[in-house]
Amino acid sequence: MSKEVSREQLDQSLKLFIVLSRAHRAINDHVHKLIQQHEMNPTEFAVLELLYHKGKQPLQQIGGKILLASGSITYVIDKLEKKEFLARVACPNDRRVTYAEITDKGKDMIESMFPSHERRIHDILSVLEEDEKETAIALLKKLGHHANEYIPKD
């Protein structure tokens, strides 16, 4: 049973989509500039941050954890390995599995970058009061969960 949607409702949904997209882009532009100052791209930073905070990870699972296509992961891992920020480590129990593990040089890099990274994010988002942030988190989670479960009707 299909629910009738008004023009106003469609326009409001499109407006929200555009506002979300522009806000996301504006925030990311600032964050990415800071990352690039450290001669790293956002994907390299995401992999390094994941390994720093979560420990070694199977190469096959990194893409899903940082929302990147698996084909691109090998390229990023190669670049980080060349910079000596991570090392590939064979799984002792399963020869099919290789882990990426952050090196001491990689830890030093993240530890030098992360305080300014999180501070920049905080400064950008500080326009919102704490209760507004909580509301935004709840609403965006709700939206994200619905989008993940959404099955188009057409």
Image (spheres, grey):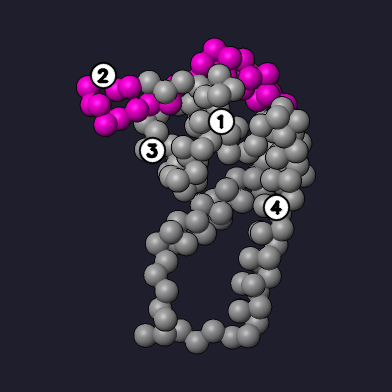
The answer to whether the residues at label 2 and label 4 have Cβ atoms under 8 Å apart is: no
Q: Is residue 74 visible?
A: yes
User: In the rendered structure, which amino acid carries the disc numbered 2?
Assistant: Pro
- Residue identified by numbered label 2: 92
User: Visible in this render: residue 129?
Assistant: no
Crowding around mark 2 (Cα neighbors within 10 Å: few <14, some 14 to 19, many 20+) is few
- Magenta segment, which residues? 90-116
- Residue type, numbered disc 4: Arg
Above or below, 133 against 10 in this view is above
| The magenta stretch spans residue 114 | yes
- Say what amino acid the circle numbered 3 marks: Gln
* Residue beneath disc 3: 61
Question: Does label 2 or label 4 sit earlier along the sequence?
Answer: 4
Residue under numbered circle 1: 79
Q: Residue at x 42, y 85 (%)?
A: 2
Q: Which mark is residue 25?
A: 4
Quadrant location of the N terminus? bottom left
Element type at marker 4? helix
- Residue 104: where, in percent of width, then height? 54, 12
- First in sequence: mark 2 or mark 1? 1
Q: Secondary structure at mark 2?
A: loop
Q: Quadrant of the C terminus?
A: bottom left
Q: CA distance from mark 3 to mark 2?
A: 17 Å
